[in-house]
Image (spheres, helix red, strand yellow):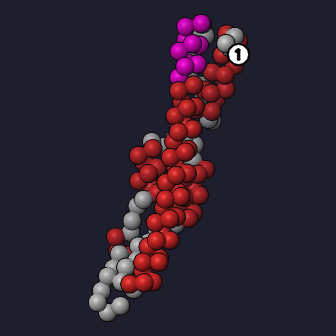
């Protein structure tokens, strides 16, 4: 079990991470507020870890789908899907997970360019 001082230090570190360059709002430091903020920081840490795992899984699936699409296109010559540029995926990896919801991140990873989908009998 962590001491009150350790929890206060962890809360302060978490708040600095969350607020970044912005000032941390004033709050009363007492055992009750520290305990509440400590539990929030723990839940946030677990959620961030889970979101990171989902993002990594989606990156892998996107890569697999891109490979399958390319193979299908080569076999059938009538289908192409533009994938999300790798720079976009790298950008998502650098963004703090607290900045976007997992739904927003998933949307970015699987956005299709509708104009790039084509299939014609000429191919």
Q: Position of residue 49 (x, y in %)?
A: 57, 38
The residue lying toward the viewer, choosing from 68 and 87, is 68
Residue highlighted by disc 1: 6
The answer to whether residue 53 is left or right of residue 73 is right
- Residue 99 placement (x, y as % from top left): 51, 41
Whether 78 is among the magenta residues is: no
Mark 1: secondary structure: helix
Q: Is residue 79 above or below residue 10?
A: below
Q: Above or below — where is 21 with respect to 89? A: above
Residue at coordinates 33% horizontally, 79% vertically from top-left? 118
Furthest toward the bottom, the residue is 122
Nearer to me, 18 or 61: 61
Q: Which residues are magenta?
A: 31-40
Q: Which quarter of the rendered picture does the C terminus lie within?
A: bottom left
* x then y, percent, for residue 14: 62, 27
| Residue 120 found in image quarter | bottom left
Q: Is residue 33 left or right of residue 119?
A: right
Task: Indicate the position of residue 69 as horizontal and vertical percent values.
Answer: 44, 73
Q: Which residue is at 53% across, 39% downward? A: 50
């Amino acid at each position: 079990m962590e001491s009150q001082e350790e929890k206060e230090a962890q809360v302060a570190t978490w708040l600095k991470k969350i607020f970044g360059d912005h000032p941390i709002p004033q709050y009363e430091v007492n055992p009750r507020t520290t305990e509440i903020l400590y539990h929030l920081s723990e839940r946030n840490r677990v959620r961030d870890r889970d979101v990171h795992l989902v993002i990594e899984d989606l990156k892998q699936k996107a890569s697999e789908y891109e490979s399958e699409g390319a193979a299908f296109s080569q076999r059938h010559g009538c289908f192409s899907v533009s994938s999300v540029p790798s720079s976009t995926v790298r950008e998502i990896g650098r963004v703090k997970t607290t900045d976007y919801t997992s739904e927003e991140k998933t949307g970015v990873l699987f956005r299709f360019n509708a104009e790039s989908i084509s299939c014609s009998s000429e191919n």
